Amino acid sequence: MTSFRSTACRISHRGKAFGALAAVVALTGTATAAAAPAAHPGHRGHQPANVILLIGDGMGDSEITAARNYQVGADGRLNLDRLDSTGAYTTYSVRKGTNTPDYVTDSAASGTGWATGTKTYNGAISVDTHGRRKATVLELAQRAGYRTGDVTTAEVQDATPAVLGAHVSDRDCKGPQETSRLCPSDARENGGAGSIAEQLVQTRPDVLLGGGGKYFEQQVTAGRYAGQTVLDQARSRGYFVATTAAQLRTAPRDKPVLGSFAPGNLDLEWVGPTPTHQNTPAARCSVNTHRDASQPHLSTIADVAIDRLDRLSRSGKGAKHGKGFFLQIEGASIDKQDHAANPCGQIGEKVEFDRAVGVALAYQKKHRNTLVIVTGDHGHTSQIVPAGSTTAGVTATLTTADNAPMTISYATASEPGGSQEHTGTQIRVAASGPEAYRVEGVTNQTDLFTTMTKALSISRD
């Protein structure tokens, strides 16, 4: 299998002398991924066979700009800057039982928006504001004969991956134990469909990769698999279970693969200075030497997922031959490290996410019937402020690829050390390939569902 990932994680720089092209090549490990695919003639009429949706959780314009400045410099360009069409979408959720806007969404409501085309309340997983189940783009794609994948650096039961294959009233109902306590009407022993973990296994995407092993180890409470673990249920459903990057690479070609690479979220890529209330000297980020070496990086996960889905869709075995695939790839800890006010953690996850974008664009260059969409789910707190300044919150100053200081402020936590907040800003959405024009202008987050279902010629009917 061709790998598009660089064999080394490079975060050191020699200034702008390398230029934007060299910098992006360093991100992806391949010159072909550095430039966006050539414009596709007839975007409005060319039917794509594949859709790859890349979600940077919490990736607003400020997070993109900080990563660009740090990694390739202010005049450089990341892979996600090189897609053919760019627009913005609004991200608000609605209050439970109403259609009244809640201007700051969480990942569950925002994910439900693009997964189902339906606005819902914060915390809901692919149910509407009244708790009714809504079919997702992944479920509809499966029914139409497409191969499907759902991969993340978070727990696979986390909100963004969960919205594609589960329907529960509360995003925290990740395993059978949590569901019995928090979502009793969804629990198997009460006649419900079960926890997010159980439902994802039941939905059975061809590729399901990420963390969350602790929820797969919980026992099913009722039904056919009562007394067995959710992982036992997955194996009964035909899954090959991989727990390391090496096992992922060698997984059987003819079986769906479930990757469970950590008890919780995958480890961070980078570490660096902790923000403080005082002005501190500029610093550089470092590779996280404590990262579990057996865990795959997101770009590896993306590479394997795309390759497997491509092969499966062309084999025709178990699906309609040549029908193509739908794949969602999430860089989850951009958001999580924004919450933690960890600039190097946040930027490192964003840079690795951009490598995964490079993998998708490299595939698209050879498969021009592929629609690639890159976006975030909501805004977040980090702001680039005048270098060396202090704010009402905490700040840290980093030395960027331009050999210049960049100060990042986090100022939305209600108390010192508390979790930073999401924001209600609109979010960039960009696309390349057939139907890319649909993301242009200012749209609603739910319009992304329509873009993807129209691209794949699938519907709720």
Image (cartoon, helix red, strand yellow):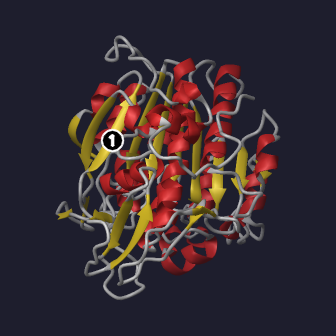
Front-most of residues 156 and 441: 441
Taking 228 as reference, is 213 left or right?
A: left
Label 1's element?
strand
List x then y, in percent, for residue 3: 70, 33
List x then y, in percent, for residue 379: 31, 59
Q: In this view, does 146 lie above or below 301?
A: above
Please state the total of marks drawn on the protein image: 1
Determine which residue is flagged by label 1. 429
Instruction: Kindly indicate the quadrant of the structure image that contains residue 142.
Output: top right
Dot 1, crowdedness within 10 Å: few (<14), some or many (≥20)?
many
Quadrant housing the C terminus: top left
Front-most of residues 43 and 201: 43
Front-most of residues 91 and 412: 412
Name which residue lies at 60% across and 54% down: 200
Name which residue lies at 64% across and 27% down: 310
Front-most of residues 290 and 126: 290
Q: In this view, does 4 lie above or below 322?
A: below
